[in-house]
């Protein structure tokens, strides 16, 4: 019975996984979706003095070359399918970082039928950056939190399905609209 070899194999696999997570956390390329005021505070993160490139973050030229999808600002229902298409084009492992209050609650448009109220119903969010608008240093903290989660292996590495079957998005939107209409009927008496 040779238990030393199996323990060594498990240990080397663990080291390899830790090494791949560490290297992945040092080179994170992002593609971003921003609407309206959502893009105001991100450019200062890219420039001095914060300069997120020194931490290994870079804007990617296309979703097929990116590791993280950054969503900022409100998400109109008409562009939700485009956002999901961006996410689907990204290679595994892929991550989602969401900032601002609008993707979480609808923000100023919380009562609009045309605005997504909670983006986590449609995309698997790894890190939230709260605020309206999050300051540049809050964005940097969000990026660093994502890097830490990747380094520690705390983000799922298996493919996470976004669209279960054709038409599910429309059904989810209609269900939310029906719920909203019912709530309005009850409020009005």
Image: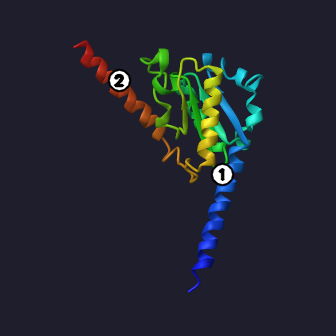
Determine the secondary structure under disc 2. Answer: helix
Residue 114 location (% of width, % of height): 48, 21
Residues at marks 2 and 1, CA–CA distance in whole angstroms:
42 Å
Colour treatment of the image: rainbow
Tell me where residue 82 sits by quadrant. Answer: top right
User: Looking at this view, is 71 or 113 the one in front?
Assistant: 71
Residue 188 location (% of width, % of height): 26, 13
Residue 3 location (% of width, % of height): 57, 80
Mark nearer the viewer, 2 or 1: 1
- Circle 1 packing at 10 Å, graded few (<14), some (14-19), many (20+), is many
Name the residue: 55% across, 39% down: 126
Mark 2 or mark 1: whose residue is earlier in sequence: 1
Number of callouts in the render?
2
Name the residue: 26% across, 15% down: 187
Can you say whether 105 is above or below 10 in the image?
Answer: above
- Horizontal relation, residue 181 to residue 100: left or right: left
Quick one: which residue is furthest to the left in this view?
A: 189
Tell me where residue 65 sits by quadrant. Answer: top right
Quick one: which residue is furthest to the bottom in this view?
A: 1
Is residue 58 in view from this perspective? no
Q: Identify the image quadrant of the C terminus.
A: top left
Q: Which residue is mark 2?
A: 180
Q: Which residue is mark 1?
A: 21
- Circle 2 packing at 10 Å, graded few (<14), some (14-19), many (20+), is some
- Horizontal relation, residue 1 to residue 170: left or right: right
Determine the secondary structure under disc 1. Answer: helix
Residue 48 location (% of width, % of height): 78, 22
Name the residue: 73% across, 25% down: 50
- Horizontal relation, residue 47 to residue 12: left or right: right
Q: Identify the image quadrant of the N terminus.
A: bottom right
User: Looking at this view, is 47 or 4 the one in front?
Assistant: 4
């Amino acid at each position: 019975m040779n238990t030393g070899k199996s323990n060594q194999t498990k240990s080397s696999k663990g080291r390899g996984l830790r090494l791949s997570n560490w290297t992945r956390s040092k080179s994170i390329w992002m593609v971003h979706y921003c609407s309206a005021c959502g893009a105001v505070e991100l450019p200062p993160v890219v420039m001095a003095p914060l300069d997120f490139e020194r931490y290994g973050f870079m804007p990617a030229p296309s979703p097929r070359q990116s590791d993280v999808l950054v969503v900022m600002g409100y998400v109109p229902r008409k562009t939700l399918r485009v956002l999901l298409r961006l996410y689907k084009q990204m290679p595994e492992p892929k991550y989602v970082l969401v900032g601002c209050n609008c993707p979480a609650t609808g923000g100023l448009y919380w009562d609009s039928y045309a605005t997504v109220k909670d983006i986590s119903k449609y995309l698997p969010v790894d890190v939230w950056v709260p605020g309206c608008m999050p300051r540049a240093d809050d964005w940097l903290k969000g990026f660093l939190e994502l890097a830490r989660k990747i380094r520690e292996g705390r983000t799922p590495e298996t493919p996470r399905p976004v669209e279960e079957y054709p038409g599910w998005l429309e059904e989810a939107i209609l269900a939310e609209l029906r719920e909203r209409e019912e709530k309005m009927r009850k409020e009005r008496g």
